[in-house]
Amino acid sequence: MLGYLLGRLTGGLVTLLGVCALAFFATALAPGNPAAVLLGNQATPERIAAVTHQLGLDQPLPIRFAIWLGQTAQGDLGTSNLSFKPVNDLVLAALPPTLELALASLTLAIVVAIPLGLLLAQHANKWWARPAASLVTLGISVPGFWVGLMLITIFSVMLGLLPSGGFVPVSRDIGENIRSLILPTVTLAIYLIPSIVRFVRVTAVAVLQEDYVDTARAKGVSPGRILMHHVAPNTLITTMTYLGLQLGVLISGAIVIEIVFSIPGLGRLGMNAVLNRDYPVIQGVVLIAASGYVLVNLLIDLTYAFIDPRIRTND
């Protein structure tokens, strides 16, 4: 188990290092000068050159990368070129709304998608199962921002039941915090549910065709008991890995949803940084998102190996 853990930790660190390099060079090589964006259209070339030097943007790229990597390794993500605030503070302020939205959406998606996927697999031969599966597949193609706008139109504009945007911290008012997250949570969950349902259904159908399931049927075990005691456990183990991979989809979906609902989370912070070429903030947001992705997948791998010892034996 220790060797398996060290292997996964090494793989995670290599992935983070690769993400660091990609985030830095992708932003540094992008066209445009952040100093010119910061000073506006009326800035003189001399003033732009002075601010470029002040921000350290006139140094060679390898030196800038080495400096940034060294600061990052010490927990310092730098200073925003736009607000001159520490990136650490900006990220910490934007993290709670994103975490709340992501956790609530993922929980809702799991609660709805896994039973639905098992149900569709259990009744795969029924006349309504195939149209229902096609409807789920169709749901994957529906853009998340469109769903969000439709929910705002119905529940905020027409019915006036829920706020159309914004975020209330849980420390200020827990009731308003929940109300402000209902529509974005449902929107992001709808974005996730179809792909999880499809994966669970396909996996469960394969498990239902295993020999031990046929043996259980031959012994007269009821379909419901077979589903709960044989199919569901074996389906959920592989679904855990799939949910870890879906974290990337969750992060990209959260960025869109945060913009639609004006939630001051990591996605909105990153988007504003991109528009203003605020390189330190872009790099900080990418690094934090990648770290979350690596950490969650590491936890899933370890849980998977703990449940099924064959995983760490064969690794």
Image: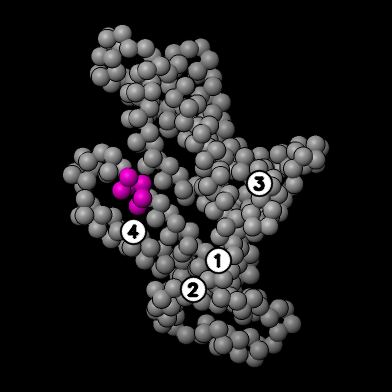
Callout 3: SS = helix
Callout 2: SS = loop
Segment colored magenta: 298-303
Report the residue at 56% width, 30% height from top: 138
Report the residue at 28% width, 21% height from top: 210
Residue 45 visible somewhere in the drawing: yes
CA separation in Å, label 1 and label 4: 21 Å
Tag 4–tag 2 contact (CB < 8 Å): no
Tag 1–tag 4 contact (CB < 8 Å): no
Q: Earlier in the sequence, mark 1 or mark 3?
A: 1
Query: Label 2 belongs to which residue?
Result: 77
CA separation in Å, label 3 and label 2: 31 Å
Query: Label 1 belongs to which residue?
Result: 91
**192 relative position to 290: left or right:** right
The kind of secondary structure the magenta stretch mainly shows is helix
Q: Earlier in the sequence, mark 1 or mark 2?
A: 2
Report the residue at 52% width, 51% height from top: 251
Report the residue at 54% width, 28% height from top: 136
CA separation in Å, label 1 and label 3: 22 Å
CA separation in Å, label 4 and label 2: 19 Å
Query: Label 4 belongs to which residue?
Result: 12
Residue type at mark 3: give it: Ile
**95 relative position to 21: left or right:** right
Query: Label 3 belongs to which residue?
Result: 178
Tag 1–tag 2 contact (CB < 8 Å): yes
Residue type at mark 4: give it: Gly
Residue type at mark 1: give it: Val
